[in-house]
Image (cartoon, rainbow, N blue to C red):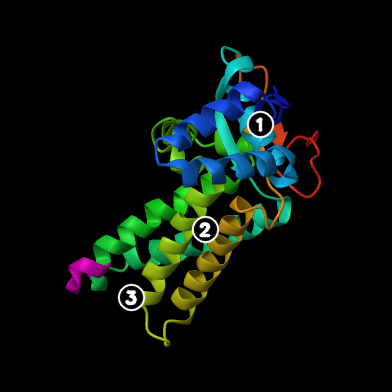
Amino acid sequence: MKQAGEKALNDPEVQKAIIDAAKTYGPEVAAAAVEEVKKWANDPATQAMARHYAGMAMGYVFLAGSGVVGCIEQGPAGVRFLAFGAGTASMVISGLDVINLANLVNPVKYVIALYQALFSLTTMLFEAPPDWVAKVPGVDNYQNMLIGNARLLTLNLGRGLFYIFQGSLWLVLATWLHFFHVGAGLALCLVGVIHVLMHFGVMPQHVAAKMRAIGGAAAAQYQPVSQADPAHHQTDEHHY
């Protein structure tokens, strides 16, 4: 499966289908498509991406029925730790804003603080070890719901934009006198940019499947599915 995408790029039938589709836009486009198809078939980055998405498909097909909840793109442990820390800081700050009833004089900011508390919880769930998440009643189900219905959050690009959005909210609403708000905003924007870079292959990433505990005998875990690092083309074989 991991080699399926790469083989498809070199399959004459696949190449012919791409070229035939390009012909509908004119001979110039078709001629350019021929050259591009040749490049794609031998481009290591394209081959790595093909293996990456083939690996995700493998996770959905072969792990289905075995307690799998869904596939999640992840970064290195250090990036996950940094993102979890930024989410935790945001959660603390938003929580303090919510319990401070004096903030009710500005209903808009108060409601945004409520949103930020929920957003921060979501950030922490996707970056925390799954066995931590499983220990909190209801929270694990919330993450599973997001994996099934908000697939954008399972992708590094989607989470990166989500983190940047959270950070921008803090930065827009806070003044420079709100040091903690500004710090949380900058941290979230930073981890957001890092996740976007991972999506474009600037930093290593891998795909993991969230496995649900079966019969209560095992803790929830992330099972590595494939490596999406164009520079190394390796399979991540360690558990999260």
Q: Is residue 154 visible?
A: yes
Q: Say which amino acid is labelled 3.
A: Leu
Q: Secondary structure at mark 1?
A: helix
Quarter location, residue 3? top right
Magenta span: 104-109
Q: Quadrant of the C terminus?
A: top right
Label 3 packing within 10 angstroms: few (<14), some (14-19), many (20+): few
User: Does the stretch in magenta take in 105?
Assistant: yes
Sequence-wise first label, 3 or 1: 1
Is residue 124 positioned above or below 170 on the image?
Answer: above
Residue 148 in the image, given as x and y percentages of width and height: 43, 30
Residue 88 in the image, given as x and y percentages of width and height: 53, 59
Q: Say which amino acid is labelled 1.
A: Leu
Task: State the residue in front, 158 or 240.
Answer: 158
Is residue 33 positioned above or below 188 on the image?
Answer: above
Is residue 185 positioned above or below 28 on the image?
Answer: below
Magenta segment, principal secondary structure?
helix
Task: State the residue in front, 197 or 91.
Answer: 197
Q: Secondary structure at mark 2?
A: helix
Residue placed under numbered mark 3 in the picture = 173
Residue placed under numbered mark 2 in the picture = 87
Q: Residue at x 61, y 33 (%)?
A: 53
Residue placed under numbered mark 1 in the picture = 9
C-beta proximity under 8 Å, tags 3 and 1: no
Residue 120 in the image, given as x and y percentages of width and height: 45, 55
Q: Residue at x 51, y 56 (%)?
A: 160
CA–CA distance in space, label 2 to label 3: 17 Å
Q: Say which amino acid is labelled 2.
A: Gly
Task: State the residue in front, 122 or 29.
Answer: 29
User: Does the stretch in magenta take in 48?
Assistant: no
Label 1 packing within 10 angstroms: few (<14), some (14-19), many (20+): many
